[in-house]
Amino acid sequence: MAKWFMAAKKADFQKIAEKFHIDPVISRIIRNRDIVTEEEIRLYLYGTLEDIHAPGLLKDASKAVSILKDKIRTKKKIRIIGDYDVDGICATYILLKGLTVCGASADAVIPHRMKDGYGINEALVEDAISDGIDTILTCDNGIAAKEVLEYAKENGLTCIVTDHHEIPFEEIDGIKKYIIPAVDAVIDPKQEDCGYPFKNICGALIAYKLIQLLLEDCGVEQTKAEKTMRELLEPAGIATVCDIMPLTGENRIIVKTALEYLKNAENPGLKALISVNELDASKLTSFGIGFVIGPCINATGRLDTAQLALELLQAESFEAAVPLAEALKEYNINRKEMTENGVKEAEKLLLSSAYDNDKVLVLYLPDVHESLAGIIAGRIREKTGKPVFVLTKANEGVKGSARSIEGYSIYEEMTKCSHLFTKYGGHKMAAGLSMREEDIDNFRRLINENCTLTEEDFEEKLLIDVPMPLGYVTKTLLTQLSLLEPFGNGNEKPVFAQKNVYFIRAFRMGRNQNMARFEVMDEQERYYELVLFREVERFEEYMNRKFGDRTAEKLFSGQKGTKETAPVMDIVYYPSLNEFRGKSSIQFLLQDYR
């Protein structure tokens, strides 16, 4: 069970509530997100695109625009080299569309995950040379490709890097020496001398900002430029969610605006993808993007070529986009099935006592499709609470992906073992690598020897925003809670707690009967509906341990209990509005219990 903590950050909640016409509960939640000053609160609640940072603050952005403008004027061929994940695909599309609107002779190549691996490589440079390309423009990659890009420069190519990953470094006597490719322009806010105030933006948003500057500098007619930027914000918002960027600051504004735009998507491909997945565009959330739209875009790059997803974004009509969207959906269905099999293999491996003392899990699954390593690593991290590397057999050696936990920078820790990798890169919470098969055991040993995580770091923690009686919740409060959306990394959905809730009776729900609906009562004998969408068996086991062997059976029998006979628990919950057959009612989603 998770350890519960109550958020205890101080502020004058009543004053904030009066100033911004919100409930004091909403004030407390905002303060819990470290939003402190009145200006920060205003931006959080009502920020618009006018409040985001100027693209010219990005180091080398103006230099890159000047180079690209000259290449457009002299009709030089520009090649975009992207990446096969959602961020890379969206960034590639944004650059290609923006350059085309500016009149550039541009094309795009997305490396094949299996044949090319991550990012630009020498073969892609050779292809560019033979195709008469003058300029290479990377997106969502390139910062770690110093040798390849310098090879491109030696062969007469102009090279511009746009990336958002951590800058590679060597540590000598405790001092970090950063390694940056010697190319014509490098746009990456993680550079030490980059003055951009908000460092945690994705590759697609960097591409978006570069195109914003380029449209202005190329003198594109204002109406056309505005229409282009509106359409390009949609994929930039999707990439921000799917690359798990913190939904704070300008990221929050970008995603919030993108969700609004997606209600009437300008991009036919995205409109088709929303439609074939039977999502209600008017109620699309960051959850729908992160768990439905994003995985469909991702699936092509995982199982085949990401070029198909790029084609979807380039579709010129809804009718032309639908078959492509259907294909992406089918890829994702196959990906889900393969992922489940891979997770089972990983769990089987963990049954061995050999992993009992490992603080960092390094799991070698040679038969698993290499594109699924990151998803499987994420699933095992959720189950174990530990940083996880999943390695798979590749054409040459081994490839892998890592997912981390708070307090453990996976990229920094990998740097300490860099001599064992043929290639690696990433950031604090996720990374990728290539290595020789014979070095796996050494890597597992070394990454664990270097690990300083304690037992407390692995303890599951649940931060409760506000202790709040179920009876306090009204439809007005629910409307105000929607002001806090979009939820995600860095702006988690708030949770509330109430003590002494009486479980009166329960009903199983769902196709597989793995969900439950409860009738509960508070100490004032007011009744409420509580819903549990996962792990009903775990709930039953806990209840039987706590109250006696047949407690769950009695609860689910359908027979209504009384205040005297009902099991009583403290709960953590989130309130929501349940709409059914034209009627709406408040229900409570059960998050945890004890």
Image (tube, helix red, strand yellow):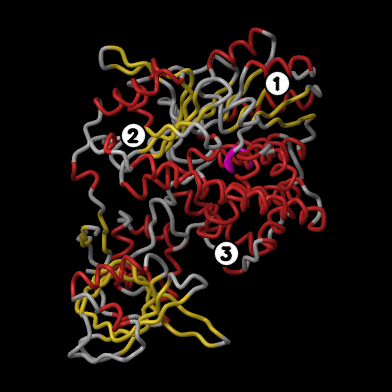
Does the magenta portion include 291?
no
The residue depicted at 34 percent of the width and 41 percent of the height is 350
Residue 284, labelled with which disc?
3
Q: Is residue 216 visible?
A: no
Earlier-in-chain disc, 3 versus 2: 3
Against 556, residue 386 (above or below) is above
In magenta segment, residue 86 = yes
Q: At x 44% / y 67%, what residue is drawn?
A: 483
Residue at left offset 25%, top offset 26%: 450
Mark 1 touches mark 2? (CB < 8 Å): no
- Alpha-carbon distance for marks 3 and 1? 38 Å
> What is the x, y in percent for residue 43?
43, 57
Instruction: Tell me which segment is drawn in magenta.
Output: 85-89
Identify the residue shown where x is 24% and y is 83%.
502
The residue furthest top is: 154
Task: Name the residue carrying label 1.
Answer: 135
State left or right for residue 532 relative to residue 136.
Answer: left
Q: CA distance from mark 1 to mark 2?
A: 34 Å
Residue that mark 2 sits on:
409
**Camera-side mark, 3 or 1:** 3
Identify the amino acid type marked 3: Leu
Q: Is mark 3 in CB contact (under 8 Å) with mark 1?
A: no
Residue 90: x percent and y percent? 63, 42
In primary-sequence order, the first of circles 1 and 2 is: 1
Report whether 461 appears left or right of 109. Answer: left
Secondary structure beneath label 3: loop
Few, some or many residues within 10 Å of mark 3 (<14, 14–19, 20+): some
- SS majority, magenta: helix
Q: Nearer the viewer, residue 359 or 392?
A: 392
Quadrant location, the C terminus: bottom left
- Establish if 321 lies above or below 408: below
Of pointers 3 and 1, the one earlier in the residue sequence:
1
